[in-house]
Image: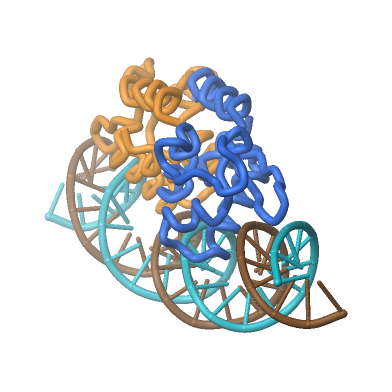
Chain colours: A blue, B orange, C cyan, D brown
Amino acid sequence: MNIVEISKILANQTRVDILKWLKNPEDNFPPHQDIDHFDDGVCVGFIQDKTGLSQSTISTYLNSMQNAKLVIPTRHGKWTYYRRNEEVIKAYTQSLSEEL
Amino acid sequence: MNIVEISKILANQTRVDILKWLKNPEDNFPPHQDIDHFDDGVCVGFIQDKTGLSQSTISTYLNSMQNAKLVIPTRHGKWTYYRRNEEVIKAYTQSLSEEL
DNA sequence: TTTATATATCTAGAATATTAGATATGTTTT
DNA sequence: AAAACATATCTAATATTCTAGATATATAAA
């Protein structure tokens, strides 16, 4: 677990917000039109709408979060859904409390 | 506990190194010339020597870490000693594992 | 009380992060 | 096959961070 790498991701309020929103998608996003669950997370467009930032910015953010393995993407038709990677997030908070 | 504020500090390897070194000063630094303990932490010069960065850079780093309450400075004569603020560090890792 | 030492602050250039518009790619619909 | 839609990638402008040299300040030593 690389503290610096993960901290760079968490050093931005929007990215922290996204991670928190994805803990409870049903409370933070409208239902998807094709599916009636959030098992694979939330589509990029909904996340973009909620942040108010541009599509390219959010796509870039989600890509960086995916590179750090904090989120997992799943393609469903023309949508990409992102969900939290709970194992990695848990492993990070755990290792931080041990290492730091 | 502000995740973004603390993460900005931790998003730099040198600052993370400093925090880790200060966990065990006796293993990471030579003894001070005036005192024979590390109860108030380590002087700026020793930290600077170990990082290899400039004096002004390290002073700036330590100041930012102090602003975030991650370290506590103590003046002894012409030296300033910095030690970890264990309460805040613990509170942060705790709140991160709850909030994130 | 001048000089030396340790640290802090100021200033500025280089590197990196943020952000959006334009364009490309992949998928669905017509 | 063309048009429409969702997302990804490219490019570039702006903002922030990194970093060191110069200078200021505080304390100690001569």
Establish if B19 lies above or below C6.
above
What is the count of numbered marks? 0
Using the image as rendered, state which of residue A38 and residue B55 is in the foreground: A38
Place of residue A97 in the rendered image (x, y in percent of width and height, measured from the top left): 48, 20
Residue A71: quadrant of the picture? top right
Q: Is residue A96 visible?
A: yes
Q: Which residue is drawn at the image coordinates 39% and 38% (left, top)?
A: B3
Q: Is residue B28 visible?
A: no
Establish if D24 lies above or below A7.
below
Using the image as rendered, state which of residue C6 and residue B88 is in the foreground: B88
Place of residue B63 in the rendered image (x, y in percent of width and height, measured from the top left): 33, 44
Which quarter of the figure is the N terminus of chain B placed in?
top left
Which quarter of the figure is the C terminus of chain B placed in?
top left
Using the image as rendered, state which of residue B98 and residue B70 is in the foreground: B98
Establish if B15 lies above or below B94.
below
Decide if residue C26 is on the left or right side of residue B71.
Answer: right
Place of residue B44 in the rendered image (x, y in percent of width and height, measured from the top left): 39, 38
Q: Which residue is drawn at the image coordinates 51% and 40% (left, top)?
A: A7
